[in-house]
Image (cartoon, rainbow, N blue to C red):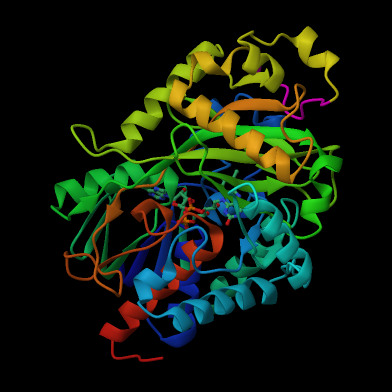
Amino acid sequence: MKFDVAIVGAGPAGLFAAKEIAEKSRLKTLVIDMGREVEDRACPASNYKSCLKCSPCSIMCGVGGAGTLSSGLLNLRPDIGGDLSSILKNEKASWDLVRYVDEIFLKNGAPEKVYDPGHDEAEDLERKAASVGVRFIPIRQRHIGTDNAPLVIDNIKKSLDTCGVEFLLLKRVSSIDKGVVTLDDGSKIESKYILAAPGRSGANWLAEEARRLRIPMKYQPIDIGVRVEVPAVVMDPVIKISRDPKFHIYPDTYDDFVRTFCVNSRGFVVQEVYDDFIGVNGHAMTHKTSENTNFAFLVRVELTEPLEDTTAYGRRIAMMTTTLGGGKPLLQRLGELKRGRRSTWDRINRGNVKPTLLNVTPGDVTMGLPHRIVTDLVEGLDKLDSIIPGVSTASTLIYAPEVKFSANLICTNDDLESPLENVFMAGDGAGLSRGLVTAAATGIIAARGILKKEGVEE
Ligand SMILES: Cc1cc2nc3c(=O)[nH]c(=O)nc-3n(C[C@H](O)[C@H](O)[C@H](O)COP(=O)(O)OP(=O)(O)OC[C@H]3O[C@@H](n4cnc5c(N)ncnc54)[C@H](O)[C@@H]3O)c2cc1C
């Protein structure tokens, strides 16, 4: 098989790259993914139980990548989920690219409604946060919803089919070299350009490939923490101002960076399955709601010497927590965490917050997470409680571990071309993004880099 462009990964980065190339050129493009078509991607286990048995994991892999079964919350800012300005070196161009990505989602069925923090209300919240030394970041957001996201992704896929983009699914790429992609079954695909966009599920593989190909990489900071679940009414006043409110906190004892992330109003906590541990995440649907709101509460961890490998550190912590949970995430009430007692189902059932994820083990989160991280989280929640009363009560539910790995940053030029000529990088797997909009945007930047080499200017 011979192509002009072979894209590894059909996540937002790969799909938006393919779209840009197909709409602006006649280059013959192939998208390869180890996962399935959108309609075949439902996780066979309700609430994502026992999906360790699925390989590849349906939640992370297939057309649309990790975006298809996500909440589909689009953060319409270039500095959330990555930093597009640092890639484009132009503030206006990065905002324009966010708008461009958003328009594509919109044209393919994302809801019209945008959550735009009203100026006065956002300012009041900013002031309230600032009074306890916390920063509130107002963001315009569009919420596709878990139930709508597969439809939107399917529309994008169909538009690519119409443009003649070819897809090779249920095929794992084992290696990339200049001009050749090799699949697990040994077959080879020749392609002038290769774009590696394998997302988080392929980040380790891409790092190994980069090492083999002597492409330089940098370790990046990671975020380690928990998923917090509270009654929805507690968060509602803030949710009215911002759909996914982002607070940046520096707790007193360690002065580490702690933040709220991925707030799911009236949503559900879900398992996130990795090769060697089971973490947690959250999602919200437009047609099915719970009585709770959940959010990730994360501590930024950056290491220097002798250990720079933040991923190795984060994995060890997550594995320890999973071991303590007997192969499941841990669940603890905040009151028990503060008093140094493990939670039991009996104690959890006495609380006023009913967990939305039941495939967990009630236990003691402080046995799994380092003291410094627990201190940051507890102090951070107490600060947050002064802005959102009721967030830090004895009944607040804490699920662990939630770890946001940042893939190693693969070194590229401004067009996202690696030092290996005609091999481009995009998305979460190359450490260039951490969200749907930014992943899609980096796919477009790489696609434009390829088009530029072909003499097709914007
Ligand atoms: C449960 C969950 C909820 C999320 N919610 C949100 C949200 O609301 N808002 C938001 O902005 N972000 C969210 N995210 C993050 C977002 O989904 C990712 O940032 C985004 O999908 C990254 O896009 P990507 O194209 O870089 O990679 P991915 O979407 O991960 O896609 C990569 C694709 O590459 C394929 N692949 C990997 N390795 C290989 C290989 N060797 N051979 C062939 N194929 C390969 C995989 O099968 C996968 O389909 C969520 C993530 C998860 C897991």
Q: Is residue 132 left or right of residue 437?
A: right
Q: Is residue 149 left or right of residue 36?
A: right
* Residue 314 visible in the picture: yes
Secondary structure character of the magenta stretch overall = loop
Looking at the figure, which quarter contains the N terminus?
A: bottom left
Q: Residue at x 34, y 83 (%)?
A: 451
Q: Give the magenta-colored segment's residue range.
A: 353-361
Q: How many marks?
A: 0
Determine if the magenta segment contains residue 251.
Answer: no
Q: Is residue 51 above or below residue 420?
A: above
Looking at the figure, which quarter contains the C terminus?
A: bottom left
Residue 26's quadrant in the figure? Answer: bottom left
Q: Is residue 27 above or below residue 83?
A: below
* Residue 271 visible in the picture: no
What percent of the width, then of the height, locates residue 286?
A: 81, 53
Q: Looking at the image, which is closer to me, 43 or 302?
A: 302
Q: Residue furthest front?
A: 131
Q: Looking at the image, which is closer to me, 391 or 324?
A: 391
What percent of the width, then of the height, locates residue 448?
A: 37, 80
Q: Residue furthest left?
A: 214
Q: Is residue 52 above or below residue 143?
A: above
Q: Residue at x 30, y 85 (%)?
A: 452
Q: Residue at x 37, y 76 (%)?
A: 88
What percent of the width, then of the height, locates residue 130?
A: 62, 54
Q: Is residue 126 left or right of residue 423?
A: right
What percent of the width, then of the height, locates residue 98?
A: 54, 74
Q: Is residue 349 above or below residue 356?
A: above
